[in-house]
Image: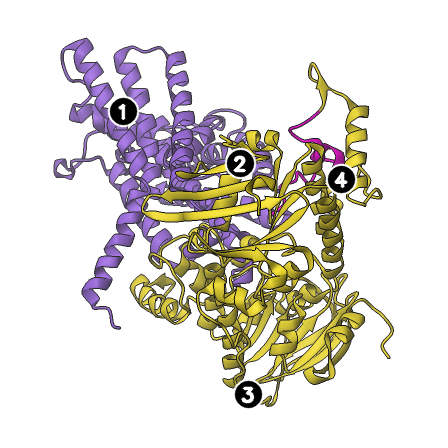
Amino acid sequence: MGGDSFLLEMHGIAKRFGATHALRDVSLAARAGEVVALIGENGAGKSTLMKVLSGAHRPDAGTMHLDGKPYHPTGPHEARAAGVAMIYQELNLAPDLSVEDNIMLGQELHTVGLVRQRAQRERVARALALLGHPELRPQARTGDLSVGAQQLVEIARALVFEARVIVFDEPTSSLGHRDVQHLFAVVEKLKRSGRAIIYISHFLEEIRTVADAYAVLRDGQTVGHGCLADATDAQIVTLMVGRSIDDLFPSVAHAPGEPVLALEGLSGRKMPHNVTLTLRRGEVLGLAGLVGSGRSELLRSIFGLESVRSGEVRVAGARFTPRPRAAIRAGLGMLSEDRKGEGLAQDRSIEDNISLSYLRPYTRWGWLNRRWRARSMAGLMRSMEIKARSPEQPVRELSGGNQQKVAIARLVHQNADVLLLDEPTRSIDVGTKAMIYRMLGQWAAEGKAIVFVSSYLPELLAMCDRIAVMHRGRLRDVRPRDQWTDETVMACAVGAESE
Amino acid sequence: MKRSSGEEAASDVRGTWRAVSGALGPLVALGLVFAFFAAADYATSGESRFVGARNLRTIAVQTSTVAIAALGMVVIIISGGIDLSAGTALALAATVLAWCLREGYGPVAAVAACIGAGLATGFINGALVSLLRVVPFIITLGTMRAYVGIAKLVGEETTVRPLPNQIPDWLSMLVATRPEPEWLVLPVGVWLVLGLSAALAAVLRWSVFGRWVFAVGSSEATARLCGVNVPLVKVAVYTLSGFFVGMAGIYQFARLTSGNPTSGSGLELNIIAAVVIGGASLNGGRGTVLGTIAGAAMMGLINNGCTLLGVSSPAQDIIVGVIIVVAAALDQWRQRRLSN
């Protein structure tokens, strides 16, 4: 490997925040026309590294070179000017502006303050054409677009200012299957146009599809890198967690018992449409389908977060009107897919977040006994392995995996009998994922019933007793797990005729 | 692993201390403002008129009206709302009180009607915010005007003046600067403010309702997911604030000894300012009673101090304006540093 053939080189990067070493000795290099996957658990230092690269943080030590020249950005603006672009997990778009205005935002072409409309339009059209999506209308309101299309807008933004190094931070975490395929095609195009891509992701099979090389980060250090073709999944996972995980999908013996949740022709305002389904105690039911197929809407209707137009929900034989409060009383627990916006009140403490749905045990005449609560929370935090300074720490300061544990701890705490889990393993580290898989089995063994929504087929096929597939708001098919394969689930989800 | 109860008590104390330290910024600022005026007063006049017990009692009494109304406002602001109608609702309550006295309904009924009027204005605000799902800023912008109108109807477009013998002594005592009896140190009305503050602080920290208010303010969606009846909490929050508005109406009447339907216009901005100077976030989810009281006291000190020093009224306005902006900016800066 000739060092000078790299477009981007980071060497010996270190960064400290107070007493914590976020980065110790990190090296990362990418050639033009190469996709490098940056892999690591949450908290391994990926975000900090990327903030160093984009100029948001200045490194304490180490060197960076761009195209062989020293590169020391003092702020995001300089990084941008040097040709380094970031595509963040959360999109940074103004929903009320048009696609074109969003793409050109902050880099408007102007003559003494007047926008040069035509020149802008040309640039935008060129960028969208390069992405292979000339159909995206520059005048459309950005907020009306799908998440996948919004992501394209963000990428187009990078192309307009001629970025040569593009960083994708977990770009597929909010995309449906089809959008993911489109994104892969876009990454491929960018790569062939001679750009260097750094691709951050948790998903190994996704990395294998798009990336050429990999670098693994653990505890702020580069613990391994090389050509992807030369490494096995097991090797990479071992590097990530520092120990080998042979049983990512542990199986706990459990047997379905009597029915506990019954849906009878449940229809929402738009979705779901006429869903009839029975769930038994001790059963894990997978809910597959594309994003937008109505999986989330089905869960939300059952829990009363979205209005039900017709049909009924029975829990343990008793009919109830879906409203969150009634649902919780009836023993339902819901994990939101939107951890930031809905699942957790980010500014509130861990203990507030866990206990909010079930304060009754610590309450007398409307007064809360904080000491009882603190005692119970401390125990729960320990058994859920939530890493935090104290139960009073705001949830915002926790890593994604720990936040998810807090959200799940809430369901455990309220003694939910029927768990509605919407994308419980999305954008969390492998360790927490393994823990969630283990808990699924344990809950089932305890006689709880679980509905498990996921866009990641391997985990559904590994963990569920039955899998239901949704398509355009309808429940298309429900079968025991052994009657499904990757291909048949996907065919069903995209609406292909079944055999 | 079992934690000893001593350790638990320690963690409880820590938690309480953290809650207090949230208001530390406003308290320190209050101290600075106090020290500044004390020094400036001594330097210009050679005597200490400002720090004298009589002057401080006067400040406390003058601040009471805004401080009580700010207690209600801080709850609304923590829940993520705002109430622009607080000032005019307060005047409405005071006008109702004056009217009842003048018409000879007796002081007890009059005070009850005053608090009732406050509760009603709050309830209407809360119900409209919850039912119509229009942002509270707009709703209360509307009710602000409506309440002036209703107050004018009650007062027949003029100030309602009950006869002096219709105003009971205990009502005037509320705003008397001399404590009665002497051993109380502070005037009765000020003690009442402090008592209500302590009660509200306890509700916010130790009641289930308090947890709900904070949850709704920091994330409505999360509160809903957790089974909190968000519309009901909002109605309760605005109604509770209405109670404090009614109480503030009593103080307003006691000071003016009349009910002026338009005497509350603009007061809402002082009330909101006290809460904001006290470190609450207009985004909701954050705010303390202690900070709010400090904020109200600070504005009282500034007004009084400036008058003593002979600072003109325009200059006073500018100073208060600057302090609001500086307080908000400092708080932002502190929050950013904390979150890093």
Secondary structure beneath label 1:
helix
Residues tagged by mark 4 and mark 1 found on one chain of the structure? no
Q: From the top left corner, tell me how far across and down residue A82 is, in percent.
A: 60, 31
Name the image quarter holding residue A333. bottom right
The mark closer to the camera, 4 or 1, is: 4
Which color is chain A depicted in? yellow
Vertical position of residue A176 compared to residue B31: above or below: below
Q: From the top left corner, tell me how far across and down residue B217 is, in percent.
A: 49, 48
CA gap between label 4 and label 3 equals: 50 Å
| Image quarter in which the C terminus of chain B is found | top left
Residues tagged by mark 2 and mark 1 found on one chain of the structure? no
Q: Identify which residue, A1 or A98, lies in the foreground.
A: A1
Question: What type is the residue that disc 4 sits on?
Answer: Arg
Residue beneath disc 3: A254
Q: From the top left corner, tell me how far across and down residue A351 is, in percent.
A: 39, 60
Residue beneath disc 2: A65
Residue beneath disc 1: B33
Residues tagged by mark 1 and mark 3 found on one chain of the structure? no
The mark closer to the camera, 2 or 3, is: 2
CA gap between label 4 and label 2 equals: 38 Å
Vertical position of residue B95 compared to residue A482: above or below: above
Name the image quarter holding residue A349. bottom left
CA gap between label 2 and label 3 equals: 55 Å
Asked if the magenta segment contains residue A92, the reply would be yes
The mark closer to the camera, 4 or 3, is: 3
| Image quarter in which the N terminus of chain B is found | bottom left
Which color is chain B depicted in? purple
A466 with respect to A325 (left or right)? right
Is residue A462 at all visible to an observer of this figure? yes
Residue beneath disc 4: A141
Residues tagged by mark 4 and mark 2 found on one chain of the structure? yes
CA gap between label 2 and label 1 equals: 52 Å
